Amino acid sequence: MVVLVIALALFFDFTNGFHDTANAMATPIATGAIKPKTAVALAAILNLVGAFLSTEVAKTISGGIINEGPGGVAITPEMIFAGLMGAVLWNLFTWLLGLPSSSSHALFGGLIGAAIVGTWSFGAVNFLVVLSKVIFPALLAPAVAGGVAYLCTKMAYGITRRSDPDSGDKLTQKRRGFKHGQVFSSSLVALAHGTNDAQKTMGVITLVLIASQLQAPGTGPHIWVITACAVAIAGGTYAGGWRIIRTLGSGLTDVKPAQGFAAETSTAVAILASSHLGFALSTTHVASGSVIGSGLGRKGSTVRWGAIGKISLGWLFTLPAAAVVGGLAALLIRTGTVGIVIVAVLGLGAILVMFYLSQREVVDHSNAISDVDAVGEALHIPSRKERDRLAAKARAAEKLAEKAARRAAETAALRAKAQAALDQADTAVLKAMTKAAAAADAPKPRKKQTSKKGK
Amino acid sequence: MQFATIANLAANTANKAVIDWKGFIVVAVVTLVGAGFVVLMYSLGVRLTAISSDHAARAHTTAKWGAWTCFGLCGLAVAIGIILIVPLFYKTVMGWFGVTA
């Protein structure tokens, strides 16, 4: 049983790497900073290295969320198996549909669901720890990363903006220099991904070992666990990369090198800092937050709130949905050995079906190169052409307004002239009248009429 | 949920900090300062490269050196960050300065 769980956990790690390669490497490949093959290999190696760097997150997961040990409930490897099954299935399902979702939340959701159903009590889950170590980081970390990315993008554009002080002409800005920086910043994201996401699987495996009394509670993961997880996530990353390369021909969201650099730097720093403190946050969410933040930092961008709403709905659903799947699996497993076999067979079948479906489906721009890329669609950043067009429209409107104003002025002037002429005519009539009164009486009214007509 | 568990939850909330605000603030500040510094240095470097390539006739040696200094500082900041995070590196580097952790 333990071996089965570990195998499933490693498979989850593999899907995780598979899912998330694009987060780190899509932009530098798109801007042509690195060759696709190099990028994927680099991401895989850095994920491997990152997995060894820190084990804080693994400790968070293996100790805390589920009340194990004395005084708590007995967590069996079967429950963890059910939870992992929920996580893997949900992960593959969202990947198939191209929905943005977080592997981490799928994992937590599955485990929580399985623990609740497996013990028939809510006491199995330490909701406070879930709240403080999962929900809050999930909400706050993207916000922090997004805010910082916004500031950094503003700064990067502000510093590199150059124009001739005399003529106001634009000088060479060399913003393409950020392309080379992106190689490093995206490598950092890959490294950060290794430090956070590979840890989650380590935590689960350690949890299994603790649950089956092969390891003392409260200790960190073994070295062979770390190695296995690192290799699994690196393998997944490498395998997932080939999908990106295939996708490359079909165009990507417009992310400029300077913007990408700012976003990736903030993502990497945020994830590394929270990994160091043991916050298990979702790399997908943080990267998405950064992309939105840096997009806002660019000139004239607007937010498509509808798209953002759809994405956050997907985020919200991940945890409960995986919990339901995990719970169902746990329910089946409660029936005994037969249940385990049923769950294993069903799970394997579902995985194979989904894999088959994914192979059949054409990978193109519509099913999103990455979750983060999908988030990029939520922002409307006007391209140069669009900006020019907007400016032209504004100019045209201005001209129209000017013309209208001129016409109004002209009519006003005309009216004034007419008024003046009328006055003149009146005075002329008066003069004529007095003159006529002095001379004779008869032609008085006719004179007035003609003078009015003449005007 | 049973009453006992609710009572347990309530009891736990009373004496335990629910959210690790300190950790969160640390993450926020570190992110702001770290990412801010790296982006600032890199942008300055890019700008100085642009200046140094402005006039082909005159070589802008100062700007060029400035640019490379900025890039260097940027890399240094990243290196320091990684050293701080990895316990093994941290111990090694502290060892160079004669500090044993």
Image (cartoon, coloured by chain):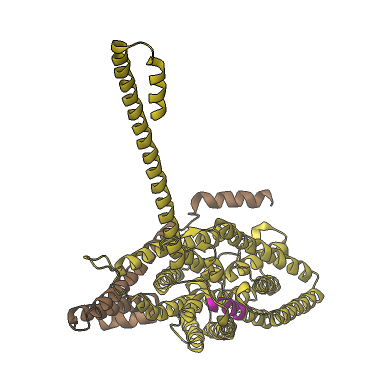
Please say whether residue A2 is one of the residues in the magenta stretch.
no
Residue range (magenta): A12-22
Is A450 on the left or on the right of B62, as rendered?
Answer: right
The x and y percentages for residue A130 are 57, 60
Is B43 or A414 nearer to us in this picture? Answer: A414
| The C terminus of chain A sits in image quarter | top left
What main secondary structure does the magenta stretch of the protein show?
Answer: helix
What residue appears at the point 41 percent right and 59 percent down from the top-left corner?
A: A391
Is A339 on the left or on the right of A416, as rendered?
Answer: right
What residue appears at the point 62 percent right and 72 percent down from the top-left corner?
A: A366
Q: In this rendering, is residue A289 above or below A410?
A: below
Is B17 on the left or on the right of B91, as rendered?
Answer: right
Q: In this rendering, is residue B13 above or below A220?
A: above
Q: Quadrant of residue A430?
A: top left
Residue A301: tell me if it is visible. Answer: yes
What residue appears at the point 51 percent right and 89 percent down from the top-left corner?
A: A37
The tint chain B carries is: brown
Q: In this rendering, is residue A302 above or below A45?
A: above
The x and y percentages for residue A24 are 49, 77
Is A297 on the left or on the right of A126, as rendered?
Answer: left
Q: Quadrant of residue A361?
A: bottom right
The x and y percentages for residue A51 are 49, 80
Is A274 or A64 nearer to us in this picture? Answer: A274
What residue appears at the point 32 percent right and 79 percent down from the top-left corner?
A: B75
Chain coloured yellow in the rendered structure: A
| The N terminus of chain A sits in image quarter | bottom right
The x and y percentages for residue A346 are 78, 76
Residue A115: tell me if it is visible. Answer: no
